[in-house]
Image (spheres, rainbow, N blue to C red):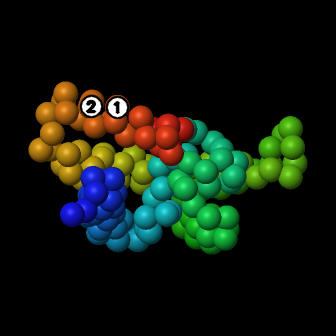
Amino acid sequence: MMNYELRAFIGISRLKNSIDKRSSKLMREYDLSLPQFAVMEALYSKGDMCIGEVKKKILSTSGTMPIIVRNLKKKDYIFSYKDKKDKRREILSLTKKGYELINEIFPRNQKIIEDSFNNLNSNEMKDFVKLLKKIDNLKNLL
């Protein structure tokens, strides 16, 4: 018999994969990858950030960030500038074109996520989030 921790992990993984699959399909409509969308969404939600902060926010590896940033700059969705306090730090920001695009995509992606949880009522959803926060490894992520 499988233990509940493993069943929970498999369930969460399958849910994430299902959402990612539907989100990826949406991103293809806009010629974006999921990591590119994640960078744009982080800047949209949190404002200008240095590359390291964005990397932490989207749970990316440092090796992929330069490629993601370069491709978003080529498409004129983001730009960067040097931090006034520390010239070694590069700050990322959405361009007008990037802001307009993410403003269009974000609600559609949010609906994909919300639809994934439509079998839960609001109290169950609150309990689910509370339980996720209770798991040690997720305390700082939610």
Write the residue at 36% across / 48% down.
Answer: 106
Residue 45's disc number: none
- Residue type indicated by callout 2: Asp
Residue under label 2, please give it.
127
Q: Amino acid at mark 1?
A: Lys
- Name the one closer to the observer, 49 or 5: 5
For residue 130, the mark is: 1
Q: Which element is circle 2 on?
A: helix
Q: Are marks 2 and 1 in contact (CB under 8 Å)?
A: yes
Residue drawn at x 84%, y 40% as measured from the top left: 84
Task: Indicate whether 63 appears above or below 76.
Answer: below
In the rendered image, the residue lying farthest to the front is: 1
Identify the residue at horizontal 62%, vertical 55% (top origin). 55
The spot of residue 79 in percent (x, y) is 65, 55
The answer to which image quadrant residue 65 occupies is bottom right
Q: Residues within 10 Å of mark 1 (few under 14, many from 20)?
A: few
Residue ranking furthest to the top: 123
Quick one: 61 or 46, which is closer to the camera?
A: 61
CA–CA distance between discs 2 and 1?
Answer: 5 Å
Q: Is residue 140 above or below residue 31?
A: above
* Quarter of the image where the N terminus is located: bottom left
The reply, left or right, for residue 104 in relation to residue 44 is left
List x then y, in percent, for residue 56: 61, 51
Q: Is residue 43 at least partly visible in the picture? A: yes
